[in-house]
Image (cartoon, grey):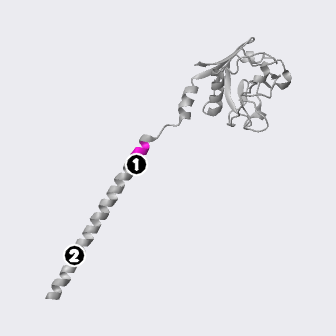
Amino acid sequence: MRKRQDSFGRVVWFFLFAILFMLTATLGCSEKQRENEKEGKSAKLGEKKPETKENIKLENNKIAVIETDKGIIKFKFYPDEAPKTVENFIKLANDGFYDGIKFHRVVPGFVVQGGDPNSKDDDPTNDGQGGPGYTIEAEFSELQHVDGTVSMARKSDPNSAGSQFYICLGRQSHLDGQYTVFGQVTEGLDVVHKIEKGDVMNKVYIEEK
């Protein structure tokens, strides 16, 4: 009888211990789950929307204006395809960087090119070699080079563009995918076709659409 009571007692203690262990484990898991959920909520609250998306939204509402003696040229931007390039051009324009710079290269049926600060002086031998003092990475896309397309000029290194750009005179399919297209002329395409080497960008600025 004594042995039977001892066995019964051990069974009871075993079940009590098992129940206590299960309760502890359950509470621990619940607490950990609550902590994970809390951390997840905190992470979501702390997340910031990519600045580029906000910039793209703003830049979609802007156009570039180039005043010349031949007339005014306006072009829209492609911030979705070339966000950093668009941002760079707008910054330079807002800083007055392009004011007084010449179109130092004009190839009929091909492109007109400008954006080199060296063209401001009276020495044409250094034209086409200058820039803002830094370079930006290429942003290739599927955009085509058509009449009035605005793209970044560069050296052999794809990531060597800085401030120089060109405007296409007609379709230039061989340039597709090789240069960063960041704009398209919307007004003054006839002016673009009248540009001659040495013509000055009297003023370049940004307007809201």
* Res. 34 visible in picture: yes
Label 2 crowding class (10 Å Cα cut-off): few <14, some 14-19, many 20+?
few
> Percent position (x, y) of residue 178?
74, 37
Disc 1 secondary structure class: helix
Q: What stretch is highlighted in magenta?
A: 39-44
Q: At 75% from the left edge and 23% from the top edge, which residue is drawn?
A: 117
Q: Residue furthest right?
A: 125
Relative to residue 51, is residue 81 drawn left or right? right
Disc 2 secondary structure class: helix
Q: Does the magenta stretch include residue 40?
A: yes
Q: Does the magenta stretch include residue 63?
A: no
* Label 1 sits on residue: 39
**CA distance separating discs 2 and 1:** 39 Å
* Res. 103 visible in picture: no
Q: Which amino acid does label 2 sit on?
A: Trp
> Percent position (x, y) of residue 128?
80, 27
Relative to residue 94, is residue 192 drawn left or right? right
- Asked if residue 14 is positioned above or below residue 135 in the image, the reply reads below
* Label 2 sits on residue: 13
Q: How many marks?
A: 2
